[in-house]
C-alpha cells in the first residue's frame, strides 16, 4: 500500500496524483485506522455500511473541495483534519515550509485547483505570528 500510494501521489503527468485513494475494509481497530490515514489515504470506509453513507463519502471526495498538503516528504490529504474534524480546520503555523492546495475533483471535467496557500516560516517570524508544530 505504501508503494502504491507513493506512485500515485508522485505521478509526474496530469491529474493522476490528485486521484482519491479510498481504503475499504472490515473492522479496523483504531491503531490500524490511524496507520492507514498516516499513509495518506483520502478516506477509510469500514464495512458493513449503508448505501447512503457510502454515497455521501464518495460525493465528498468527488464533488466537494478537498485540501492536500505538500511538504518536503508528503503530498496528500490533511491527516490532522481526518481525526479532529472541524477542529483540524483551524489555520496553522508550522516550523517548516508547506503548501496547501484546495481543489475539486469532477469525473466529467477532471481536477480544478481552487486555491494555493504557501507558508514559509521565515515570513511568519517577521509578522510576529505564534508558531505551532504541524
Image (spheres, rainbow, N blue to C red):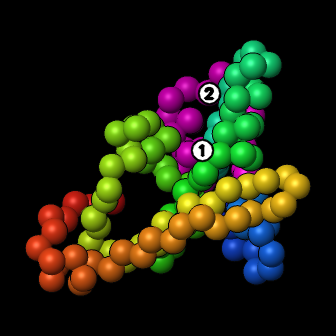
Q: Percent from the top left, x then y, of residue 17?
A: 73, 67
| Side (left or right) of 126 relative to 96 | left
| Side (left or right) of 50 relative to 80 | right
Q: Is residue 16 visible?
A: yes
Q: Residue at x 59, y 52 (%)?
A: 66
Viewer-proximal residue among 7 and 106: 106
Label 2–label 1 contact, CB within 8 A: yes
Quarter assignment of residue 109: bottom right
26, above or below 62, in the image: above
Magenta stretch: give its range. 20-40
Q: Quadrant of the C terminus?
A: bottom left
| Side (left or right) of 13 relative to 38 | right
Q: Percent from the top left, x then y, of residue 7?
A: 75, 69
115, above or below 32, in the image: below
Q: Is residue 39 visible?
A: no
Q: Percent from the top left, x then y, of residue 106?
A: 79, 53
Q: Residue at x 19, y 65 (%)?
A: 131
Label located before the other in sequence (2 or 1)? 2
Res 82 label: none
Quarter assignment of residue 36: top right
Q: Percent from the top left, x then y, of residue 93?
A: 27, 65
Q: Mark 1 highlights which residue?
A: 36
Q: Which residue, as the protein is rendered here, is positioned at the far right?
A: 108
* Magenta stretch: includes residue 27: yes
Badge 2 element: loop
Res 28 label: 2
Quarter assignment of residue 49: top right
108, above or below 32, in the image: below
CA distance separating discs 2 and 1: 10 Å
Amino acid at each position: 500500500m505504501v508503494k502504491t500510494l507513493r506512485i500515485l501521489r508522485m505521478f509526474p503527468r496530469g491529474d493522476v496524483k490528485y486521484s482519491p485513494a479510498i481504503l475499504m475494509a472490515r473492522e479496523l481497530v483504531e491503531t490500524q485506522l490511524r496507520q492507514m490515514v498516516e499513509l495518506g489515504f483520502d478516506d477509510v470506509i469500514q464495512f458493513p455500511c449503508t448505501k447512503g453513507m457510502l454515497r455521501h463519502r464518495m460525493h465528498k471526495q468527488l464533488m466537494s473541495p478537498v485540501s492536500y498538503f505538500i511538504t518536503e516528504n508528503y503530498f496528500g490529504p490533511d491527516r490532522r483534519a481526518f481525526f479532529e474534524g472541524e477542529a483540524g480546520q483551524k489555520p496553522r503555523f508550522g516550523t517548516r515550509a508547506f503548501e496547501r492546495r484546495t481543489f475539486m475533483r469532477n469525473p466529467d471535467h477532471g481536477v480544478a485547483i481552487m486555491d494555493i496557500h504557501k507558508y514559509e516560516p521565515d515570513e511568519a517570524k517577521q509578522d510576529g505570528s505564534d508558531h505551532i508544530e504541524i
